[in-house]
Amino acid sequence: MTTMPRPIYETKEDKDIDLAHLFDTFLNNRALILTITGFFAALGVAYALLATPVYLASAMIQIQAKGGLPSLTDVVGTAPAVSPAQTEIALLKSRSVVGGAVEDLNLDIIIEPHHFPVVGGYIFRRFEPTEEGELGWYPEGFESYAWGGESLRVTQLIVPDKMHGEELTLEAAENNGFILRDPEGEVVVQGVVGEPIETPDYGITVAELNARPGTTFTVIKNRTYATTEDYQNRLNAGERGKQSGILNVTLEGTDPEKAVTVLEAVAQRYVDQNIARNAAEATQSLEFLSEQVPEVRKKLDAAQTALNEFQTGNRSVDISAETQSVLDRIVDLESQISEQNLKRTEMESRFTRQHPNFQALMNQINQLQAQKTELEKQIGTLPSTQQELLRLNRDVEVSSETYSMLLNKTQELDIIRAGTVGNVRIVDHAAADIDEPIKPNKPLIVIVATLLGGILAVAFVYVREALKRGVENPEEIERVGIPVYAAIPFSE
């Protein structure tokens, strides 16, 4: 028995891709490829048109260099190089600034009208009212959705602690009324626009409601801390050019007017805090002096009264030339000591007792006290009547000098505080381009969707062809040792 030789096709391994066959396969399935590609392109166009646009609000802030003499660390040059812009950016995005804007604008209250699925948001945004309060057309039976022109403004919302972050439903009612329901649909508050309503668990003030009866809104009360963190993350600030001192601040949002309002509030609050920070020293000193003025005035009145009673009782009006000379000198010393003591009291709130400035001030006070002690020894040699008269005159003149000094310093500090300006200013106030949203990028979305559809279509055809178990070429049969006797050509 003889064995048949193995066909040559069985020993060959064809690892090359038949590009002509592959191209022919794609050509034969061009209708399927075009259909899938067109479907994805249509999805891209639909998404680009129906997606909620995102706008960018921007503002520009200038940081000016502070005046004054350089500090010791600046002169020596040992301090690390820290950009003032980085410090100001951190202050701009701090909770005291952003959180204050959140509280002022009630940003922790989220309000969204209910839109018809898929196309409702697009219809709502495209509506342009011709008069104030006009509402868009709606199909009969779908009045619960917002079709254009609807608005709701809530200035106060109090909810139980467990309801923070939960979706409440507010429904417009007849006669300018409204109904607030919890997530289970139970009515929790019912009232009229403009009137604060409070219950044991809930409280709400609807300042404005423009909607047909039956229209519903989603209302969410978030925690202020969480809302502040959200806006801190959304707020972007960067220096335009190294060491330029110009900050570009941006905020993204689906509502351009709200984004502009929030960004302007943050920028203005930041500038106000900067001014208050620069005026803090003058304000603190002014508060201290304001507390001292009434006390010194009481001492002055008491000293004048005592002097008048003594002169009336002893019928002594004048003092001797020697006593007057001592009086002038001791009044001058007392005035200096009083002024230095005021500085010491103020310095104690800013420095420790071991600080060089505090130690230098105490040395000055001790020197003045020593000179005062010497003068008091001279006073002891005067007649008793002259001593008492000198003491009373000293109390009056010292109190008067101190009172005048406090009034002058109070006026000076008040002028300084009122004229204080910050080292930052708003160059460009917040604004947004309402005609050109930054998202979505419609051309890019359509191109990507079309390319993705084409790639998926080609991949699908290729995989389907690779997994096909049929035979299209007689050579494939001969490779396994089966002879081919005839072939029937394909015909349409």
Image (cartoon, rainbow, N blue to C red):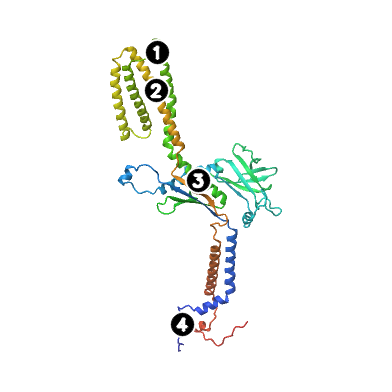
Query: Which of the two marks, 2 or 3, is nearer to us in this view?
Result: 2
Query: Which of the two marks, 1 or 3, is nearer to us in this view?
Result: 1
Q: Is the residue marked by circle 2 packed among few (<14), some (14-19), or many (20+) residues within 10 Å?
A: many
Q: Is the residue marked by circle 4 packed among few (<14), some (14-19), or many (20+) residues within 10 Å?
A: few
Residue 447 horizontal side relative to residue 115, left or right:
left
Q: Is residue 421 visible?
A: yes
- Give the amino acid at mark 2: Ser
Q: Is the residue marked by circle 3 packed among few (<14), some (14-19), or many (20+) residues within 10 Å?
A: many
* Residue that carries the numbered disc 2 in the rendered image: 399
| Mark sitting earlier along the chain (2/3) | 3
| Mark sitting earlier along the chain (2/1) | 1
- Per the model, the C-alpha gap separating discs 2 and 1 is 18 Å
Residue in the foreground of this view, choosing between 235 and 343: 343
- Give the amino acid at mark 1: Gln
- Per the model, the C-alpha gap separating discs 2 and 3 is 48 Å
Q: Which mark is residue 311?
A: 1
Q: Is residue 223 visible?
A: no
| Mark sitting earlier along the chain (1/3) | 3
Query: Which of the two marks, 4 or 2, is nearer to us in this view?
Result: 2
